[in-house]
Image (tube, grey):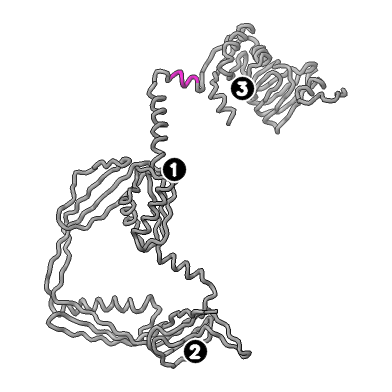
């Protein structure tokens, strides 16, 4: 392959030698150091390829041997350049492309934000924009450190920020304070803990995976009572502290009340939806639609799309803003309608209480009362659920 | 022939000294020759190469010279017979 590339770069030609003894031509050229390839022989005729610079010598050898050399085709870079010598725009364009590329690569054209679940990337992008860190700007070294510090100070939820710049791409990686604390907790190994009751109830079952059970089934416990102890005592008067783990199920009573007023406010969306499209070349916005944003209250949804290549970014992005106007309408409902709404909400409540099947509803009592202001639903549930709560023990030397 | 110390360091030198041709045959589709003196006959069914005192003849189908320099040569095609003619 590399030989083919070198031949193409140097330039070569295909030729035919016709005569009585074309073999003589082959021998003569070979002896004079002319390299021939793809030699195909027929009767009184040979076709082959040779370098461009050997053309004159090959013609003279053909004459010497009484054969006729005909160039059938030329290949290679010299011919390519010769054919396009009047097209000065191509090298000029190439040159301009290289200059533009080298200037543009000094700026950031793509900002990727990696955030944990509890932080919105859009908010982070807005904050970065306020700090001046946007597409089309150039930031290096100490300025980056300043932006990292300011971003942490601006948002209480952010625990750690790192901005990495690779060429024209910037990656902003965030960790929330909550996650940072959780990581700190998980790193603290060998901590001692007890399992205590999170609410009042009657114990129905105990599964102690680590630690000593402190209650038995049938025992009534109050909130904060010890269920599984993290301290294990042995007969030789020694005790071992461990991080207790387990499940203690108990029958508990929970009561909820839901109210529905007889006059409610509803949001009504209008059918008219405006879609504003916009392209952004580098930092220059180019409108793609004539639609404007409505003046009344509306819900806005924004979609951003960016052109990317594997391993690179094109500084062209598309934005679509959908605005849907809405109005708030106050209306009064009848007592029957209100109680129906309450029943639907009660079903949702039941689903929430069951905790994806973890808690078993043993019994429930529902009462609906209607007053002049609205309807109230009172629901009392008897549940079988895990009431364990971890309580860490502070160990002091 | 005995070679003196330092002689025959390159393959060409060696072929010159021993007055012969080194033939490298890859199956029946490719032959690499080093040290041949020229082409005596060349068609797509027969290639005869001069090797000094004798001629090496290759017979077959679709025979062609892939590349040729002063002393080296690569023949490709479907080779059916190799013959030494004195």
Badge 3 is on which residue? Answer: A37
Depth check, front residue: A61 or A151? A151
In the picture, measured across the screen, residue A278 lies left or right of residue A45, that is left
Depth check, front residue: B53 or A86? A86
* Magenta extent: A78-83
Per the model, the C-alpha gap separating discs 1 and 3 is 45 Å
**Mark closest to the chain's N terminus, 1 or 3:** 3
Badge 2 is on which residue? Answer: A214
Taking the magenta stretch, the answer to whether it contains residue B27 is no
Per the model, the C-alpha gap separating discs 3 and 2 is 93 Å
Q: Which quadrant of the figure has residue A1?
A: top right
Question: Which secondary structure lies at badge 2?
Answer: loop
In the picture, measured across the screen, residue A157 lies left or right of residue A266, that is right
Question: Which secondary structure lies at badge 3?
Answer: strand
Depth check, front residue: A126 or A150? A150
Give the answer, above or below, for where B30 lies relative to A267.
above
Residue occupying the point 38% across, 52% down = A147
Residue B46 x, y percent position in the rendering: 68, 21
Residue occupying the point 61% across, 16% down = A46
Q: Are marks 1 and 3 on the same chain?
A: yes
Judged by depth in the image, the label closer to the viewer, 3 or 2, is 2
């Amino acid at each position: 392959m590399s030989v083919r590339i070198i031949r193409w770069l140097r330039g070569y030609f295909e030729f035919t030698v016709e005569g009585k003894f074309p073999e003589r031509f082959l021998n003569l050229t070979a002896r004079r150091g002319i390299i021939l390839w793809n030699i195909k022989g027929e009767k009184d005729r040979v076709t082959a390829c040779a370098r461009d610079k050997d053309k004159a010598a090959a013609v003279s050898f053909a004459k010497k041997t009484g054969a006729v050399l005909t160039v059938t085709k030329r290949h290679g870079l010299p011919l390519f350049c010769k054919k396009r010598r009047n097209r000065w725009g191509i090298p000029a364009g190439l040159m301009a492309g290289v200059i533009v590329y080298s200037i543009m690569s000094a700026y950031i054209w793509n900002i990727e934000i990696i955030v944990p679940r509890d932080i919105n990337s859009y908010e982070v992008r807005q904050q970065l924009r306020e700090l001046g860190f946007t597409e089309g700007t150039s930031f290096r070294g100490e300025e980056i450190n300043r932006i990292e510090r300011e971003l942490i100070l601006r948002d209480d939820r952010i625990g750690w920020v790192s901005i990495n710049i690779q060429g024209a791409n910037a990656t902003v990686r965030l960790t929330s304070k909550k996650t940072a604390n959780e990581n700190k907790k998980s790193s603290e190994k060998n901590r001692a803990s007890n399992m205590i009751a999170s609410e009042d109830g009657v114990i129905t079952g105990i599964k102690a995976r680590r630690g000593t059970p402190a209650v038995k089934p049938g025992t009534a416990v109050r909130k904060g009572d010890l269920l599984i102890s993290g301290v294990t005592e042995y007969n030789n008067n020694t005790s071992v502290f461990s991080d207790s783990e387990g499940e203690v199920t108990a029958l508990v009573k929970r009561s909820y009340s839901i109210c529905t007023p007889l006059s409610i406010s509803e949001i009504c969306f209008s059918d008219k939806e405006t879609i504003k499209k916009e392209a952004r070349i580098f930092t220059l916005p180019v409108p793609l639609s004539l639609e404007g944003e409505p003046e009344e209250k509306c819900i806005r949804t924004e979609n951003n799309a960016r052109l990317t290549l594997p391993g690179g970014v094109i500084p062209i992005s598309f934005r679509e803003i959908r605005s849907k106007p809405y109005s708030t309408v106050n209306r009064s409902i009848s007592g029957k309608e209100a109680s129906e709404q309450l029943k639907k909400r009660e079903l949702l409540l039941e689903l929430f209480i069951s905790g994806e099947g973890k808690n078993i509803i043993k019994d429930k009592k529902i009462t609906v009362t209607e007053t002049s202001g609205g309807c109230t639903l009172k629901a009392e549930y008897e549940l079988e659920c895990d009431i364990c709560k971890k309580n860490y023990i502070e160990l002091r030397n | 022939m005995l070679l003196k110390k330092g002689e025959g360091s390159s393959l060409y030198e060696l072929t010159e000294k021993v007055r012969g041709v080194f033939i490298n045959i890859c199956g029946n589709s490719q032959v690499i020759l080093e040290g041949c003196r020229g082409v005596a006959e060349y068609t797509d069914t027969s290639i005869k190469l001069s090797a000094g005192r004798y001629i090496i003849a290759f017979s077959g189908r679709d025979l062609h010279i892939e590349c040729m320099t002063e002393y080296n040569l690569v023949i490709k095609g479907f080779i059916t017979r190799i013959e030494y003619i004195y």
